[in-house]
Amino acid sequence: MTDKPRCAWVTEDNLYLAYHDQEWGVPQFDDRILFEMLVLEGAQAGLSWLTVLRKRDNYRQAFGNFQLPTVASLSAAELMAAPGIIHHAGKLQSAITNAMAALSIQRDWGSLSNFLWQIVGGQPVVHQYQRGFPLPSQTAESQAMSRALKGYGMTFVGPTICYSFMQATGMVNDHVMDCYRFRELTTSQK
């Protein structure tokens, strides 16, 4: 599994390899998956992504598989008692607040997906980065997404978190050009 050229940030950890090879940069349009990734990207702030990936199944259990009405009905105390997740009161309260905001977005836009994807014109932005080129930590689009989400009352959705979210959910394709996934994803999007 490690014989293919991959993005430099990928480690030899099997969980990380699988995430890179199967999920990162794949366009997601399902509201549940988009909300899950938004919560997990917020939880990751100040930590490594691998830390969050290792706790992902625990998050899915604690957050009712990220069903928006379920998360909106939770309390911070319930989540603080949930085993195997990151117990940061602000991040956990943010997930509840953000679920309520996402329900409002669904009412206004038909779906969370419609709202988020309109920021990039409804299709992935394909960057063409060479290996060794530093990827941005935020862009004009992630700044716009951050403002739009904050406009609905969301928290832990700064422009850097939004950019990581956009990379993870395929709103941008930031696989380096010599990564085998760059070619696969670019070809599948035509």
Image: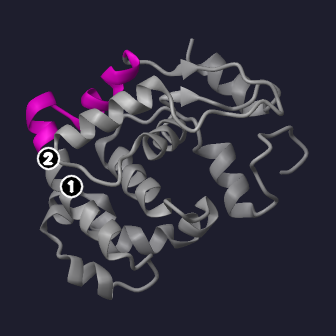
Residue lying at 48% horizontally and 43% vertically, measured from the top left? 160
Tell me what residue is drawn at x 86 percent, y 50 percent: 2
- Prevalent SS, magenta region: helix
The mark found on residue 99 in the picture is 1
| Rendering quarter of residue 51 | bottom right
Q: CA distance from mark 2 to mark 1?
A: 6 Å
The front one of 78 and 43 is 43
Residue 188 image position (x, y, % from top left): 60, 20
Local crowd size for mark 2, using a 10 Å CA cut-off: few (<14), some (14–19), many (≥20): some
Range of magenta residues: 103-121
Question: Disc 2 residue type?
Answer: Leu
| 34 to 63, vertically: above or below | above
Q: Indicate whether 78 appears above or below 20.
A: below
Q: Position of residue 119 (x, y in %)?
A: 34, 23
Q: Which residue is mark 2?
A: 103
Q: Is residue 24 magenta?
A: no
Tell me if residue 3 comes above or below residue 78 in the rendering. above
